[in-house]
Amino acid sequence: MNTKPQHVSLMIMGKEYRIACDLEDQDDLIYSAQQLDSQMRRMRDSGKVAGPDRIAVMAALNLAHELQILKTENVRLNKKLIDCLDKLSLKLENVLEKN
């Protein structure tokens, strides 16, 4: 069933953002906003990055980098899984051919 997107209110660095989002994605969106808010606040509080725009860009870059690392790891693990399944399949075929 396709439902109309709902608006979700998110607080990031003290500012409210209203985002349209499907009901089934709302929890993930809220969690993502909380993660972003936390990372931006840490950067601001460290004093190493000044200005809300630079903080936002650096936080986005950090999160994009983390995502890319996870994607790369996912590809590696998927290849490893496929290789293991191929070996298992070959072993099963060998066993079945002997019987």
Image (cartoon, rainbow, N blue to C red):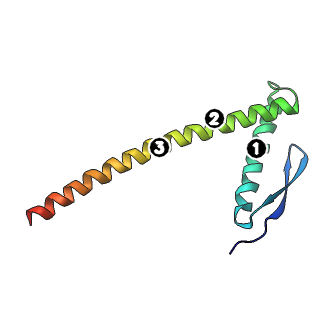
The answer for how far apart the CA atoms under marks 1 and 2 are is 13 Å
The amino acid type of the residue labelled 1 equals Leu
- Residue toward you, 21 or 49: 21
Q: Residue at the spot x=87%, y=33% of the render?
A: 52
Mark in front: 1 vs 2: 2
Residue 72 placement, left or right of 7: left
Residue 51, above or below 10? above
**Which label belongs to residue 65?**
2
Q: Dot 1 corresponds to which residue?
A: 36
Q: Are marks 2 and 3 in contact (CB under 8 Å)?
A: no
Q: Which is nearer the N-term, disc 1 or disc 3? A: 1
Residue 46 placement, left or right of 64: right
- Image quadrant holding the C terminus, namely bottom left
Q: Farthest left residue?
A: 98
Q: Residue at the spot x=49%, y=41% of the render?
A: 73
Residue 53, percent across and down?
85, 32
The amino acid type of the residue labelled 3 equals Val
Element under disc 1: helix
**Which label belongs to residue 75?**
3
Element under disc 3: helix
Q: Quadrant of residue 9?
A: bottom right
- Image quadrant holding the N terminus, namely bottom right
Element under disc 2: helix
